[in-house]
Amino acid sequence: MPPESSSSAPFTAVEARRIDAAFHRAFPEDFRWGVASSAYQIEGAVREDGRGPSIWDTFCELPGKIRDGNSGRVACDHYHRYPEDVALMRRLGIRNYRLSVSWPRIFPDGAGKPNPRGLEFYDRLIDELVNSGITPLVTLYHWDLPQALEDRGGWRSREIAPVFADYAATVVRRLGDRVKTWVTHNEPWCTAVLGHETGQHAPGMRDRRSALVAAHHALLGHATAMEALRAEGAERVGITLNLDHFYPATERAPDREAVRRVEARQTRWFLDPVLTGRYPEVIGEELEPLEVVRAGDLARIAQRVDFLGVNYYSARLVQADPAQGPEQARIVPPGDRVTAMGWPVVPEGLRDLLLKLHEAYPPVPIIVTENGAAYQDRLDGGAVDDVERETYLREHLLALAEAVRAGVDVRGYYLWTLMDNFEWDDGYTKRFGIVYTDPGSAPRIPKRSAHFYSRIARGLAE
């Protein structure tokens, strides 16, 4: 059934203590509580120590592409301030950190000879984490493709897959003695659709054919990178997909069928080839005349993953509507609570998504690699009382606990994100962090939600 609109009122202190104490019992002692980030969004230093330009450096220079006209040139200055940021995580009790490696920092020209100063930076960062008792989870591709590779066709070229594998092998050889868990791609749907079909993200193309080709090559890159990582002894390798959950607006058959069509073009487009070795029929029909899928591709893409990374932010209601294009459906809001992104707040969607994955696909451990919310945070007297975010997190963690109690094999939860950062085409206008900051040298100020999540990460419920 579609979700009901949730109350926006915060929990009382008594309710919060009772809920926190109850939900913690649902998780095993080795459950990973962490935070997530990505290189381009926080590092800055885009022209330092041999780093080459990425497609996002180029995209940010185009007029009107970024809401506030900004870029990741400085971002949170994490490249210089990482010891401070790691110390902050340690003070908050965070023991797991998902980060990404900047491909153009390792290979300024996309391939060839690696940049030693780029590798040295990640050496220092990983050492700082490990020495602080924080376990790293590393994503290899979080959208910052070297511009040199884009100039040669980017993800639209099949030749990118072996180049990506060489990059993966280079990084794991340097960091694999300390990094045990690897993600190949973050949200390849965004790489394909937002980057190549709608023009919202770099490289800013508007072509459905290019999106289909880029999607297949991203999945092929995932497969070749997995092979390279395992050949170098990586212990755990997976992929992260962005998965909204979809409900029929009513129980009528046309609305249920509309959900199936929407899922085929969004979540199943990537889930099915990775977990079952085939594309949904509607995607397969679009790919066939392009002759981009070669013999053996899908078998390689479907090789076993050690875990599936799930990024969940919201859910949608789907209503049949033949006037609305090829999907014959329209998306309607499932309630009146939305984040600053305009995304509906539907915590039960996380539970129902995880249950659906558990029931519809072969068994695979799941890590929630992103979940969080942007709100219009205000710094008042040196503090940020972001009660909306705390409520959002508590509700979603309760939904996660329900999925775990129902038998879903979830191994960890990584909150998006540690600190306010460069939010892609929204620039610095949207704040997802549990730590308040502004670009550059601004201080890091833990918000109310940071203190809440600190208790969760420490396993406390007082």
Image (cartoon, rainbow, N blue to C red):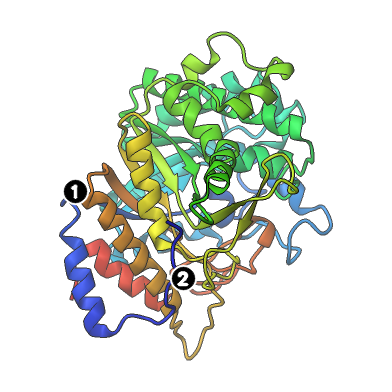
Residue shown at 52% from the left, 17% from the top: 298
Residue 143, image quadrant: top right
Residue shown at 49% from the left, 41% from the top: 241
| Residue that carries the numbered disc 1 in the rendered image | 30
Residue shown at 60% from the left, 44% from the top: 49
Name the element at disc 1: loop
The reply to whether dot 1 and dot 2 touch (C-beta < 8 Å) is: no
**Which comes sooner in the sequence, label 1 or label 2?**
2
Q: Residue furthest front?
A: 252
Image quarter hosting the N terminus: bottom left
Q: Residues within 10 Å of mark 1 (few under 14, many from 20)?
A: few
Residue 370 vertical placement versus 153 (above, below): below
| Residue that carries the numbered disc 2 in the rendered image | 5
Name the element at disc 2: loop
Q: Of the residues tagged 1 and 2, which is closer to the observer?
A: 2
Compare residues 268 and 458 and report the one nearer the observer: 268
**Residue 86 relative to residue 55: left or right:** left
**x, y percentage for residue 75?**
60, 60
Q: Residues within 10 Å of mark 2 (few under 14, many from 20)?
A: some
**x, y percentage for residue 328?**
68, 44
Compare residues 389 and 356 and report the one nearer the observer: 356
The kind of residue on which mark 1 rests is Asp
**Residue 445 relative to residue 151: left or right:** left
**x, y percentage for residue 431?**
55, 69
Q: Residue furthest right?
A: 63
The kind of residue on which mark 2 rests is Ser
